[in-house]
Amino acid sequence: MTEFIGTTLADILSGSADSDTFISYGTGAATDWDTLIGGDGGDVYDLRRGDASFYNFIIDDQGGDGAIDTMINVGRLYQSASLGYQAWASVERIDDDLIIDTPSKPHRFRDPAEPSYHIEVKDHFAGAGVEFMVSGGVTYALAAGDTGSDVADIVAGAHGRPVDSQRRR
């Protein structure tokens, strides 16, 4: 397994035809993105927090071999702070892409900060996605449709609509 290690600048890390590990440390500007491009093999996308200020990622897993790909060290799906502040992650489907925003704690009371992580998994719903995500020590299956399984799943609504509204049609 080859490791591809980024910096705190906007990086484009492109893997090999084997299983790879991508280690990305985020960026220093809100408009910058780290782009992680996987190929065949079971790739690991390590989105650990570093010294960067922003954590915007594009994951483009181009593998066609059916290997299991996983994102690890993803920000927490729930944050809380004093006096009742609570925030949850949001997940949505835009075309064939899976968009995940994890919350961060506010920098002042009741003043939500930018998302802790913004992750775009390209072509997730077209069969080129990432199968699992580890957040807060829990492994979640990233559903590629509008139904879950018997494990902890993350299911996105189609085109920004909640999953329940899709089932009523």
Image (cartoon, helix red, strand yellow):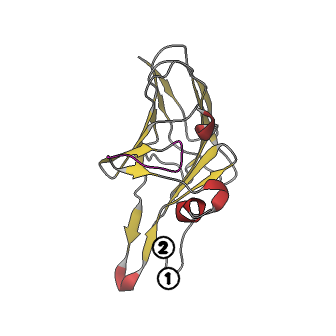
Q: Residue at x 60, y 49 (%)?
A: 28
Q: Is residue 44 magenta?
A: no
Res. 9 in view: no
**Label total for image:** 2
Most distant residue in the front direction:
169
Q: Is residue 149 magenta?
A: yes
Residue 106's label in the rendered image is 2
Most distant residue in the top direction:
17
Q: Position of residue 91 (x, y in %)?
A: 54, 56
Q: Amino acid at mark 2?
A: Pro
Most distant residue in the left direction:
137
Residue with the mark numbered 1: 110
Q: Position of residue 54 (x, y in %)?
A: 57, 53
Residue 160's place in the image compared with 151, above or below, is below
Q: Position of residue 82 (x, y in %)?
A: 35, 81
Secondary structure of the residue carrying numbered label 2: loop
Q: Position of residue 104 (x, y in %)?
A: 47, 64
Q: Nearer the viewer, residue 146 or 141?
A: 146
- Left or right side of 168 for 133: left
Secondary structure of the residue carrying numbered label 1: loop
Quarter of the figure that contains the C terminus:
bottom right
Q: Residue at x 45, y 22 (%)?
A: 67
Which segment did they paint magenta?
Answer: 144-150
Q: Nearer the viewer, residue 98 or 56?
A: 98
Q: Residue at x 50, y 36 (%)?
A: 130
Q: Amino acid at mark 1?
A: Arg
Res. 112 in view: yes
